């Protein structure tokens, strides 16, 4: 961040000694460590006139304590900053904070002066200004405590009615949501049970084929002449079944309140099993091509 333009503007705005006759290189020298003590003292005087007497006889250590106590720097670098021994970007950051605070204090004083000088006529104009934004609905009046209480009760009742309407609409949508045929649910469950029971044997056979390809000692596997067609059909059917289960899962996630969809029970374990079977089928198909 380039702090120099902002700090240069502050020096000119608050009339740093001889600032109007200086060029940029000379202004840069103001921030050098040789001038650090004078610059910090000058900024503190601009921030608060109460500092004027104190900083006249203050040492570098005293000034370091002041800028630390006012939150402009950490305790670990307060003396390094005053001696110009810390990194240049940290020095400029601390000076930037001081100028930023000076600017904020000055702006606040200007606002206070503007408020003090606010004309009485303008105050009366603001007080008498008609704030009724909708005059066609009649004059605006202040409600009594009882009227305000009654209106709040009416608002609460309207909110409750709206909540009830929303809940009723949501319940109706749930009742009309599509559900699975119980017979299909039973058939899917039975099919998944058979697949789970036969999966270990199928996986063992495929792994034996993989080891046989790598030249390892395994029991020779024998397959019928129509094995390739059956495997292709199995792979295709597994893919269709996996897509179907995924569709059911999406429906269940979309309408989690529908008990029929939740009862399918095919979300995670079944989908993972389908993926494993599909991968094993792909491995066997690849072996056939070899």
Image (tube, rainbow, N blue to C red):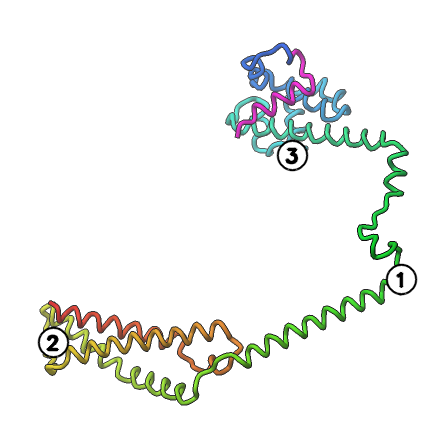
Specify the farthest residue to the front.
136
Which of the 4 image quadrants contains residue 57?
Answer: top right
Left or right: residue 74 versus residue 129 is left
Q: Secondary structure at mark 3?
A: loop
Which of the 4 image quadrants contains residue 224?
Answer: bottom left
Q: Residues within 10 Å of mark 2 (few under 14, many from 20)?
A: few
Residue 199 located within the stretch drawn in magenta: no
Which residue carries the number 1 mark?
Answer: 145
Q: Secondary structure at mark 1?
A: helix
Indicate the quadrant containing the C terminus: top left, top right, bottom left or bottom right: bottom left
Please name which of the two marks, 2 or 1, marks the residue nearer to the observer.
1
Residue drawn at x 28%, y 77% as measured from the top left: 238
In the rendered image of this protein, does residue 52 appear above or below residue 145?
above
Does the residue at mark 3 contact the one at mark 2 (Cβ under 8 Å)?
no
Which residue carries the number 2 mark?
Answer: 218
Q: Earlier in the sequence, mark 2 or mark 1?
A: 1
Specify the farthest residue to the top.
21
Closer-to-camera residue (63/269)? 269
At which x and y percent is residue 265?
A: 42, 80
Q: Earlier in the sequence, mark 1 or mark 3?
A: 3
Q: How far apart are labels 2 and 1 at the CA level?
A: 92 Å
Q: Residues within 10 Å of mark 1 (few under 14, many from 20)?
A: few
Residue 71 has which mark? Answer: 3
Boundaries of the magenta span: 1-18
């Amino acid at each position: 961040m380039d702090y120099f333009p902002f700090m240069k503007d502050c020096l000119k705005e608050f009339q740093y000694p001889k600032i109007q006759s200086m060029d940029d290189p000379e202004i840069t020298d103001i921030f050098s460590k040789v001038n650090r003590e004078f610059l910090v003292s000058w900024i503190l005087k601009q921030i608060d006139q109460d500092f004027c007497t104190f900083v006249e006889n203050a040492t570098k250590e005293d000034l370091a304590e002041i800028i630390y106590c006012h939150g402009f720097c950490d305790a670990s670098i307060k003396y390094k900053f005053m001696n110009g021994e810390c990194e240049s970007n940290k020095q400029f950051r601390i000076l930037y904070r001081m100028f930023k605070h000076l600017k904020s204090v000055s702006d606040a004083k200007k606002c206070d002066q503007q408020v003090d000088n606010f004309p009485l006529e303008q105050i009366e104009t603001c007080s008498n200004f008609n704030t009724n934004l909708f005059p066609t609905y009649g004059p605006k009046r202040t409600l009594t405590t009882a009227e305000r209480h009654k209106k709040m009760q009416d608002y609460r009742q309207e909110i409750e009615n709206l909540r009830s309407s929303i809940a009723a609409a949501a319940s109706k949508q749930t009742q009309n949501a599509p559900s699975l045929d119980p017979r299909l649910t039973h058939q899917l469950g039975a099919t998944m049970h058979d697949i789970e029971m036969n999966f270990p044997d199928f996986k063992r056979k495929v792994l034996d084929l993989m080891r046989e390809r790598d030249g390892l000692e395994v029991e020779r596997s024998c397959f019928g002449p129509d094995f390739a067609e059956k495997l292709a059909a199995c792979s295709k059917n597994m893919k269709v079944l996996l897509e179907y289960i995924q569709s059911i899962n999406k429906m269940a996630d979309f309408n989690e309140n529908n008990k029929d969809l939740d009862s399918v029970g095919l979300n995670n374990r079944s989908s993972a099993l389908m993926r494993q079977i599909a991968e094993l089928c792909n491995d066997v198909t690849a072996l056939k091509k070899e």
